[in-house]
């Protein structure tokens, strides 16, 4: 099922949720293990391999509205890493990549920090929107 579907004179454009998921995974990967994707309850998830590519699309809240794409991402951050730096960079990277690679307007991107990772995960519930 396509998230975005548009007919043009040249043909049909279809963008699936997995494309958005891949863009998010690439943005998270830039932090080299200091940021992990979690579910909404804060449990760090193992990304599945889909077509040889890590995929965590089912853990993301992705919706398409008339204004554009709405995305909510849940993460845990390694202790000692700046929450504001991570969330700001994630929002900026994801927004610019979605708009440049897919042509879809990113209406809202929310990053929810569900915990801090040290020896154990310390629960948090910090939401940053961009």
Image (tube, rainbow, N blue to C red):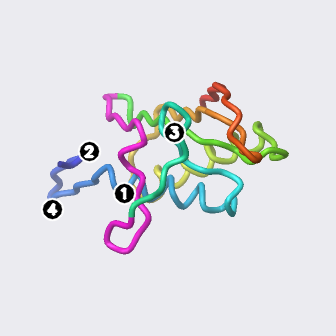
Horizontal side, residue 111 vs residue 89: left or right = left
Disc 2 to disc 1, C-alpha distance: 9 Å
The residue tagged 4 is: 11
Disc 3 to disc 1, C-alpha distance: 15 Å
Residue 129 at x, y percent in the picture: 60, 29
Task: Sort mark 3 into few (<14), some (14-19) or many (20+) by Cα contacts within 10 Å.
Answer: many
Horizontal side, residue 31 vs residue 99: left or right = right
The residue tagged 3 is: 73
Task: Sort mark 2 into few (<14), some (14-19) or many (20+) by Cα contacts within 10 Å.
Answer: some
Residue 69 at x, y percent in the picture: 40, 37
Q: Nearer the viewer, mark 3 or mark 1?
A: 3
Asked if marks 2 and 1 touch (Cβ < 8 Å), the reply is yes
Vertical arrangement, residue 86 with respect to residue 40, above or below: below
Q: Which quadrant would residue 29 be assigned to in this image?
A: bottom right
Q: Which residues are magenta?
A: 49-66
Dot 1 lies on which element?
A: helix
* First reached walking from the N terminus: tag 4 or tag 1: 4
Asked if marks 4 and 2 touch (Cβ < 8 Å), the reply is no
Q: Which mark, residue 3?
A: 2
Q: Which quadrant would residue 79 be assigned to in this image?
A: top right
Residue at horizontal 38%, vertical 35%? 68
């Amino acid at each position: 099922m396509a998230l975005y579907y548009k007919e043009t004179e040249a043909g049909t454009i279809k963008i699936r949720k997995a494309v958005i998921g891949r863009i998010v995974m690439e943005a998270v990967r830039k932090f080299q293990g200091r940021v992990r994707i979690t579910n909404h309850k804060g449990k760090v998830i193992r990304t599945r391999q889909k077509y040889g590519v890590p995929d965590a699309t089912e853990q993301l809240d992705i919706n398409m509205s008339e204004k554009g794409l709405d995305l909510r991402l849940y993460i845990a951050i390694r202790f000692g890493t700046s929450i504001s730096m991570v969330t700001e960079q994630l929002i900026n990277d994801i927004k610019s990549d979605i708009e440049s690679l897919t042509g879809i307007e990113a209406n809202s991107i929310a990053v929810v920090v569900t915990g801090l990772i040290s020896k154990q995960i310390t629960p948090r519930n910090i939401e940053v929107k961009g």
